[in-house]
Image: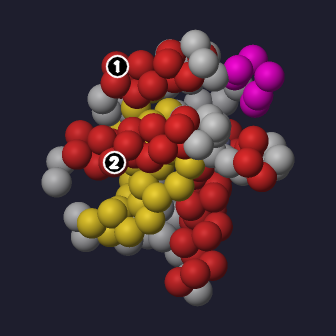
């Protein structure tokens, strides 16, 4: 599967989030060309401001599989990971993170958040996580546009 196929899986998860009353931030975890986990933002559902898709997937997948190192895994997320999630991606030592919309694309409320790009957080972490921006950027941004109109 190509970058776009995995991103479509993340978008599909984002749509599930939207339909269940959550924010459409979503991601999938990939190993050996297979989707092994999915997650979306549960801030509203959990009443937890840290319940972001990327953090959720790292926590639950590592816990369920009794591992702390995701160097054999890649993540596809529909929006650029925030500084908190980018840090979690570095801590988990993922091999790659690909994102769709970037933090300047959508109605993401970023002014209230830590204004650091995913690439900068990863670079400063010293980890070797490859960052691939803007996979299906328009389709991802459209999901957030739809969300902002609900
Ligand atoms: Zn986040």
Q: Secondary structure at mark 2?
A: helix
Q: In the shown orientation, is residue 10 left or right of residue 24?
A: left
Q: In the shown orientation, is residue 18 left or right of residue 143?
A: right
Ranked by sequence position, the earlier of labels 2 and 1 is: 2
**From this viewpoint, is residue 48 visible?**
yes
* Residue in front for this viewpoint, 138 or 74: 138
The residue located at (22%, 45%) in the rendering is: 5
Q: In the shown orientation, is residue 142 left or right of residue 26?
A: left
Q: Looking at the image, is mark 2 or mark 1 nearer the viewer?
A: 2
Numbered tag placed on residue 138 in the rendering: 1
* Residue in front for this viewpoint, 17 or 51: 17
Per the rendered image, the range of residues in magenta is 109-114
Which quadrant of the figure shows ligand 1?
top right
Q: Quadrant of the N terminus?
A: bottom left
Q: Secondary structure at mark 1?
A: helix
Q: Say if the magenta span includes residue 47.
A: no
Look at the image and name its color scheme.
Answer: secondary structure
Q: Position of residue 17 (x, y in %)?
A: 55, 42
The residue located at (42%, 55%) in the rendering is: 28
The residue located at (44%, 65%) in the rendering is: 37
Residue for badge 2:
9
The residue located at (50%, 33%) in the rendering is: 79
Q: Position of residue 88 (x, y in %)?
A: 64, 56
């Amino acid at each position: 599967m190509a970058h776009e196929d995995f991103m479509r899986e993340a978008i599909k998860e984002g749509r599930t989030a939207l339909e269940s009353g959550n924010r459409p931030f979503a991601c999938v975890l990939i190993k050996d060309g297979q989707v092994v986990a999915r997650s979306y933002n549960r801030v509203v559902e959990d009443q937890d401001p840290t319940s972001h898709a990327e953090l959720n997937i790292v926590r639950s997948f590592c816990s369920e599989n009794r591992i702390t190192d995701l160097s054999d895994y890649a993540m596809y997320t529909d929006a650029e990971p925030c500084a908190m999630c980018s840090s979690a991606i570095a801590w988990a030592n993922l091999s790659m993170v690909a994102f769709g919309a970037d933090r300047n694309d959508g109605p993401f409320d970023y002014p209230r958040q830590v204004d650091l790009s995913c690439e900068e957080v990863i670079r400063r972490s010293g980890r070797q996580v490859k960052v691939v921006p803007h996979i299906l950027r328009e389709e991802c941004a459209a999901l957030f546009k739809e969300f902002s109109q609900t």
